[in-house]
Image: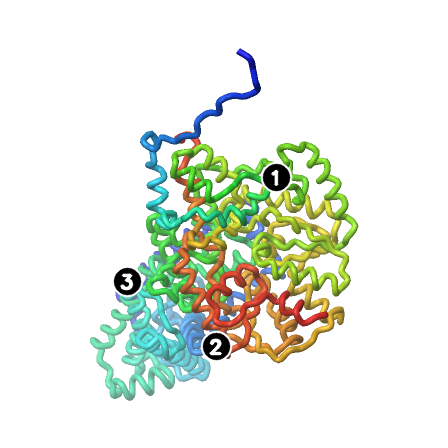
Amino acid sequence: MRPLFDPFVLPFVISMTFVLLYCIIGMIRIVFQLPKEDRRKFLRSLIYPKSALKNFRDLVNDCLLHTKIWKRKPLLGYMHMSIALGWFMIIIVGHFESIAFSPLRGLEVPFMPKLMSNLYLPIFFRYFAIEDLSLKAQIFSFLMDFFLLMIISGIFIAVVKKKKPRKVGLKRVTKFGIKEDLVRLSLWTIFPLRFLAESSMANIAGGSFFTKYLGFELLFGGNYNETLSMIFWWLYSIDLAIFMTLLPFSRYMHIPAEALLILLRNAGLKTTEPRKGYALAEIYSCPSCGMCIDVCPMSEVKDNYKNTAVYFIRNIRKGKRRRDVKAMTEKCLMCGKCIEVCPLGIESLDIKIAQRNKTYYKIKSDFEYLKSQQDYKTTRPQDKAHSPETQQLSNSATQQLSNSATLYFAGCMSHLTPTITRSMKKIFEIAKENYEFLDAEGSICCGRPMMLTGKVNEAKALIDKNTELIKNSGAKRLILSCPICYKVFKEEYNLEGIEILHHTQYINELIENDKLEIDRDDKRYVYHDPCELGRAFDIYDEPRNIIDNIGLLTPGKSDKDMAVCCGGSIGSLTMTLEERDEITKNSIKDLMHNNPDEIVTACPLCLKTFARLAPVKVRDIAEIVANTIN
Amino acid sequence: MIDFGFSISKSSHIKMDDVDLKLFNKLEALNPDIKTCMACGLCTATCTAGKFTDVSFRQIILMLQRGKEKEAVEKVKKCMMCGKCMLVCSRGINTRNILLSITRIYNEQNI
């Protein structure tokens, strides 16, 4: 007969109660911080069968199996899966085991025997149990040993990862302070200690291949020493207690927070406040794994890796001075690579934008002049001041647009690269497209650069004006040359019934419908994916298909969703030209990996940025198409 | 006196001794690249808003340097932040951030 209670369980029970309370209170706090509409949406999504099923699937895939990490780095995927799934299974199987073989069976228990034996679930089951040789018990102990071995193998990889990150395919890992090191050490030692504790008395409590034969027989030489065993049980419990108590204040908070984040994300919520609600769930979910460090274009410059997403989120969480966080927010290029690799899919850009929206500008923008601007085709302001009739004139000009179904909007940046607009005109003519060049004489901005500075209301004025102009034209299709415009037109504009296309999509469509006759050449091209076309909208195949029709497409070192930002991004507010040049050089090096004859891109901003530093010719995709058709 | 339709225009002379450059110095400390501006005017030539209004980055900097803050701020308000000036700048000045800094440092009440 084993005892029913021993004081060594107390450290664990107390810390476990603390961590559960902490997580529940934190969860309620986050849910209450959500805007009212979002909260209702969230609660509804928990009930609907369809979204509930998706929740379940995602929870299993992301929290337990870690399929996303498997896809990128199999070894790291195994490490996470073995620890997460192994631990989870040990808890679940352990519960069933302690219900089935509760030491209370067959005992006279006061007050409601059934209830008591159901409530009494010894967490440290092996200490209180006596070996049972039935098949059922053997299966249970085999499973428990199997998952314990699985966890320990995962921890082994974790130790290797810490000592030699390159072995698991990482260049840089996040740097941590002493506290995080302590928590990690306590996590690493939990399961080896459990193994020692269970092995040390496997002759009494029983066990399977791992604890009984490998542990008890080989390691302990088949001798049972009560004092030694007790030391291990105490160490095991204290170690668990240290881990549980520190968990809410360390990066391991991502374990419970991730579950909440998945539920919130599946409800379709987005960040609205930089430090509340959804953003808070994201901030707590960041495991500081540092996957974003290697891919961030900024970390190419020494010391600038401190600006990457993982450090940004950590600084918010630590409650660092607002000024530091703000500086990091404004430095980011907003290329979105960190989100692409994030195993938790933390939308750190949304947090940054929300943070930028909080910036207080003493001087407000004034776009009153847009209202009197009926059309872009007006002359310079000084001329206008002398002729009050221009407004009426321009009114009729707007109405003339309605003849054509297609509208071409080049955007500000494309006006700096006239080869793009010229090429597009040529393509339109050859394809016999009945189009109208909306901003042939210049235009107002699309509003995205304004949004990126955090001035949402001001951007609204620009968006409204453009919407009005486009809707008045009566066009059914809108073709854009600039991915920056494309993103904001797709996301912020309300242009119902108007199809929005980037010129890569449009040209690809023409080629597929045999509207363009292309003379192939034998040049080798490499395609650079602009951030706002590739990662933002997954437009990867259209440009590649076009280039396939013209010449030989060679891959860069990192393609598609891993393409490196050109460095010119207007997403960054404070980055200096020197820092930008470093990023551009690195991006070019990446593209020149297979020695192509030309670099092709689909963004006027990338084109302009590359053209300054590239060793080969850089051209827009529209230009190479226009040069090969007659 | 007979009105010939002529008048003497107000002097545009700026007395630099009377100009308080406290805010400009603050701006310059935040954005040291302002010092490298050589007023070439590329920014003005490409400006999107400049097509419709009198926005001119070159003038804004010049006006702030000479203490004509009110006029400069009026221009800053009309900027659309499109970033074309930054792309063409021959000195690689981060014009967008300078414009944002101006809207943070200067205040319509204190100028």
Q: Secondary structure at mark 2?
A: helix
Q: What residue is shown at x 50% (from left), y 42% (from top)?
A: B56
Residue where numbered disc 2 is placed: A593
Secondary structure at numbered mark 1: helix
Give percent across and percent down for residue A401.
75, 48
Q: Say what secondary structure mark 3 lies in.
A: loop
Q: Residue at x 45, y 57 (%)?
A: A282
Of pointers 2 and 1, the one earlier in the residue sequence: 1
What subunit carries mark 3?
A
The image quadrant where one finds the N terminus of chain A is bottom left
* Label number found at residue A370: 1
Tell me: residue A380, above or below residue A437: above
Q: x, y percentage for residue A499?
A: 70, 56
Q: Earlier in the sequence, mark 1 or mark 3?
A: 3
Give whichever of A250, A100 is nearer the camera: A250
Going by the image, does A475 lie left or right of A132? right
Q: Which residue is mark 3?
A: A177
Disc 3 crowd rating (10 Å Cα; few below 14, some 14-19, many 20+) is: few
Q: CA distance from mark 2 to mark 1?
A: 47 Å
